[in-house]
Image (tube, rainbow, N blue to C red):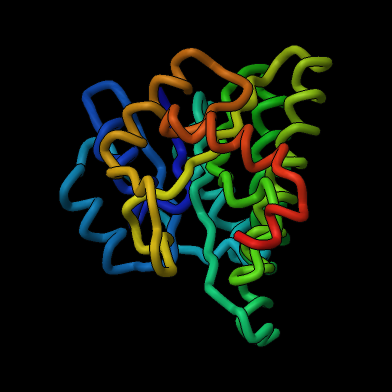
Amino acid sequence: MNIIIIGATSGIGLDLLKRYAVSGNKIGILGRRKSILKELERCYPSNVITCAADISQQNVLSEAIKFFQLHMQNIDLIIVCSGIGELNPSLNFNIECPTLLTNVVGWTHVIDTFYNILTHQGFGHLVAITSIGGLRGESQAPAYSASKAYQINYMESLRKKAYKDGRVCVTDIRPGLVNTRMAKGENLFWVMPVEKVVNQIIKAIKQKKSKAYVTKRWHVLAIIIKNLPYFLFKRM
């Protein structure tokens, strides 16, 4: 397969790369940290090509996408893992702004561009890693939870569009708390190991699910969170 992973220099994206970097797969990696990208090329010389770009910088991102198109021809699978988020109880806009530029503006540019590429070629699978954090607003990280809610709704729109178009498969992966640097705050619970989460992501991709909570136990919590009355939720 020809695979592109957006945001594969750490966390879930990096573990997905390690799992997919087997004989027969060619993987394009986009990330911000050039030193890590070069190291990945050295580790997987026959499988991996890389391009450094920040998805919040639209001109640079456009050039990176053209680079992958030139070197990979057709694309079978695209996984968008890129995202940021910070705790911001003081509502410092200088903290919120980068999250919005990355998780909303840059993310939408990536998703739209690759959806159109797959539609034009007539096949392909577009996967986005969103978050259970987008199901309700979180007072400690307003921009992060709001941006993930945006992503969840955007992916639902694309799933509906893909169903009508009949050419592209779209999957929304919604992780709970995962043991990566994105898991921030005190008294965290049900923090899942990356390896277990990635196993279930790969299974969901193989099964071409429209959406999946990972790990599965988070599906139960998602139902509770979505249906919890606000007068109880606000006390959490």
Q: In the drawing, does residue 116 fall left or right of residue 1?
A: right
Residue 82 position, x and y percent, is 51, 54
At 68% across and 83% down in the image, what residue appears? 91
Q: In the drawing, does residue 139 fall left or right of residue 80?
A: right
Residue 75 position, x and y percent, is 52, 28
Image quadrant in which you'd find residue 192: top left
At 50% across and 24% down in the image, what residue appears? 76
The count of marks equals 0
On screen, 161 above or below 138?
A: above
Asked if one can make out residue 80 in the rendered structure from this viewpoint, the answer is: yes
Q: Nearer the viewer, residue 105 or 183?
A: 183
Q: Nearer the viewer, residue 177 or 73?
A: 177
Pick the quarter of the image with the N terminus.
top left
On screen, 52 above or below 69?
A: below
Q: In the drawing, does residue 57 fall left or right of residue 208?
A: right
Residue at the left extreme?
Answer: 43
Image quadrant in which you'd find residue 165: top right
Asked if one can make out residue 69 in the rendered structure from this viewpoint, the answer is: no
Q: In the drawing, does residue 111 fall left or right of residue 21?
A: right
On screen, 55 above or below 126?
A: below
Residue 9 position, x and y percent, is 34, 56
At 44% across and 16% down in the image, what residue appears? 206
At 67% across and 43% down in the image, what residue appears? 111
Pick the quarter of the image with the C terminus.
bottom right
Residue 136 position, x and y percent, is 69, 51
